[in-house]
């Protein structure tokens, strides 16, 4: 029976039988792997601390005829501070769920893995507000999975909208000029520019994102609505946040200064 050594992050688990778990591990080289962890729920099991969401480690996996089995794991990081704060834990859980749903079995996606790893690292140990990291993660996640919203050109006519006085943001498509759409909610130039800046930075620069309260609420509102409408699993994943994390619609008429 072949053995695989894979670096990965546990994105999900399900209890199985009396003492086992089925783990979903998003790995760098093999994509998502759904594996069995035998006896991991026993207090004396060497896997008891491994089979938890957020754990990043090198997993030794036996590939069987039916389901692969975790034999051992060298834990590299647990991102433990995420568990100590409700807001960080909720946002981290959304990141895991969205990644889990987008990751395909046995299909590597190194850009998505890098995004998740850096987002969890900064969520645990960084200085940016958790909601700022969520805004950055969402727009970069949508780009990495092929669902990037229009933010520079109109989603319908393709015209550059950076100089337009009024731009609307559609739950399907993204930004649109006023000539093409009378629907959707207005979005400020500052919010659109913030999204553009978050897209062009590197994953290891995500902790630089610092948004004003009004721009943060605006970006999070529009990206949450877009993700829910564009991805069949988006609404389910974002429901983890509940109403105290995802703000109601706010569209500031005035523009403020923001670093993104």
Image: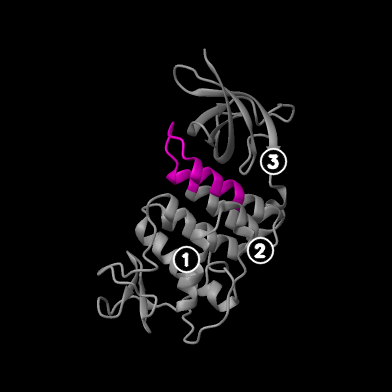
Q: Quadrant of the C terminus?
A: bottom right
Q: Position of residue 30 (x, y in %)?
A: 49, 31
* Mark carried by residue 128: 2
Q: Of the residues under marks 3 and 1, which one precedes in the sequence? A: 3
Which one is nearer the viewer's eye here, 205 or 238? 205
**Mark positioned earlier in the residue sequence (1 or 2):** 2
> Separation of disc 1 and disc 2 at Cα?
18 Å
Query: Which residue is pictured at 45% across the width and 65% down the height?
Result: 223
In space, the residues marked 3 and 1 are separated at their CA atoms by 31 Å
Comparing 165 with 130, the one in front is: 165
The residue depicted at 49 percent of the width and 45 percent of the height is 111
* Mark 1: secondary structure: helix
Task: Single out the mark in the foreground, 1 or 2.
Answer: 1
State which quadrant residue 40 falls in. Answer: top right
- Could you say where residue 95 lies in the image, as x and y percent from the top left? 54, 52
Chain part drawn in magenta: 99-119
- Mark in front: 3 vs 1: 1
Name the element at disc 3: strand
Residue at numbered disc 3? 77
């Amino acid at each position: 029976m072949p053995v695989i050594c894979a670096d990965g992050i546990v994105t999900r688990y399900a209890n199985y039988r009396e003492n086992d778990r089925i783990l979903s591990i998003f790995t760098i080289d093999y994509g998502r792997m759904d594996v069995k962890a035998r006896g991991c729920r026993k207090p004396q099991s060497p896997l008891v601390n491994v089979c938890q969401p957020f754990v990043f480690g090198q997993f030794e996996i036996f590939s069987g005829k039916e389901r692969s089995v975790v034999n051992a794991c060298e834990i590299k990081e647990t991102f433990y501070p995420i568990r100590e704060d409700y807001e960080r834990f909720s946002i981290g859980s959304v990141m895991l769920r969205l990644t889990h749903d987008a990751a395909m079995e046995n299909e590597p996606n190194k850009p998505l893995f890098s995004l998740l790893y850096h987002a969890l690292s900064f969520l645990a140990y960084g200085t940016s507000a958790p909601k700022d990291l969520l805004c950055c993660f969402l727009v970069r996640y949508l780009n990495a999975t092929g669902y990037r919203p229009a933010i520079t050109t109109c989603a319908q006519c393709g015209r550059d909208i950076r100089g337009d006085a009024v731009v609307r943001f559609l739950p399907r498509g993204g930004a649109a000029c006023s000539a093409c759409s009378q629907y959707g909610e207005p979005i400020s130039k500052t919010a659109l520019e913030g999204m553009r800046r978050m897209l062009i930075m590197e994953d290891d620069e995500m902790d630089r994102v610092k948004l004003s309260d009004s721009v943060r609420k605006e970006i999070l509102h529009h990206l949450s609505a877009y993700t829910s409408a564009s991805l069949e699993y988006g609404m389910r994943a974002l429901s983890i946040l509940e109403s105290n994390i995802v703000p109601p619609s706010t569209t500031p008429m005035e523009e403020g200064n923001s670093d993104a």
